[in-house]
Image (cartoon, rainbow, N blue to C red):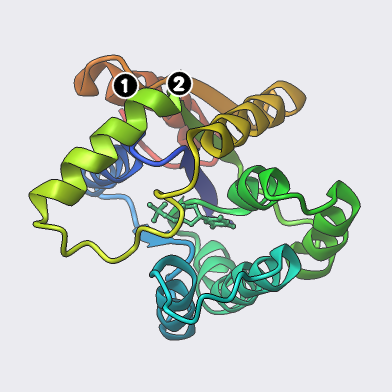
Amino acid sequence: MQGVFITIEGVEGSGKSTQLLRLSEHLRRLGLPVVVSKEPGGTALGRELRRLLLERHDSGETWCSEAELLLFYADRAQHLETVIRPSLAGGKVILVDRFEDSTRAYQGASGVAEATLDRLSELVLRGLRPNLTVLLDMDPEVSLQRVEVRNLALGGEFAETRFDEAELDFHRRVRNRFLVIAQNHPNRVALVPARDPVDQVETAIWVRVAPLLRSAGFGVD
Ligand code: TMP
């Protein structure tokens, strides 16, 4: 039996981690074989790359967008080879916090050409696509306030702030790119309004996940 590949996407502070945790707990309670992972950082190499990519660095050097893109793809290549493909071959339900759509949204918003994104995607993904992508949609003006509250609550110790600190206008472009992806892939992408109460968001996600799992042969009732 082939597994099921589900990704969750959205701007910072849209509630991905909370919803991913709720969904994974729900699936475990049902006795399903669940793997939870994330990009960047789903492997040992990925954790090194995540630190490099997301923490502030002191060199003062601006990274060119292609260099950044290739680091995200190095993370993805290792993750696909050692976690995602083996999980699918082993019949697992794999839930991944961010995947290719994040690259298209963020690196696209940083100016990487669509053709470059297409070529890398073809090279590394070799046609593999999530069975379902949950897009938690939210106005970045609101979601970034949530991020600020979280960072303050962590006493300023939260180091992964490189993208959080980008201009609001950048995050608006990211959101719009996500919305275009959803429009272009209506069968794969479930657009879920993320400002609703957490329980309501969880239900909206389940309404899309349950039929997919049923059709893949998993008992979810
Ligand atoms: P997160 O763990 O809070 O989702 O943060 C990951 C950050 O990395 C977030 O700002 C989005 C960014 N990112 C990209 O720019 N491109 C990518 O391909 C991925 C996976 C993440």
Give left or right: position of 58 versus 216. left
Front-lying residue, 98 or 217: 98
Give left or right: position of 216 versus 50. right
| Residue that lies at the very extreme toward the front in this rendered image | 60
211 in relation to 61, above or below: above
The mark found on residue 192 in the picture is 2
Residue drawn at point x = 56 percent, y = 30 percent: 175
**For marks 1 and 2 on the same chain, the one whose residue lies earlier in the sequence:** 2
Give left or right: position of 65 versus 208. right
| Mark 2 closeness class: few <14, some 14–19, many ≥20 residues within 10 Å | some
State how far apart marks 1 and 2 are (Cα): 7 Å
Q: Where is residue 202, by image quadrant?
A: top left
Residue drawn at point x = 42 percent, y = 79 percent: 58
Residue drawn at point x = 43 percent, y = 76 percent: 57
The image position of residue 203, as x and y in percent, is 30, 20
SS of the residue under disc 1: helix
Q: Where's the N terminus, which quadrant?
A: bottom right
| Mark 1 closeness class: few <14, some 14–19, many ≥20 residues within 10 Å | some
Contact, mark 1 vs mark 2 (Cβ under 8 Å): yes
98 in relation to 41, above or below: above
In the picture of the structure, the residue carrying the numbered disc 1 is 201
SS of the residue under disc 2: strand
The image position of residue 106, as x and y in percent, is 61, 48
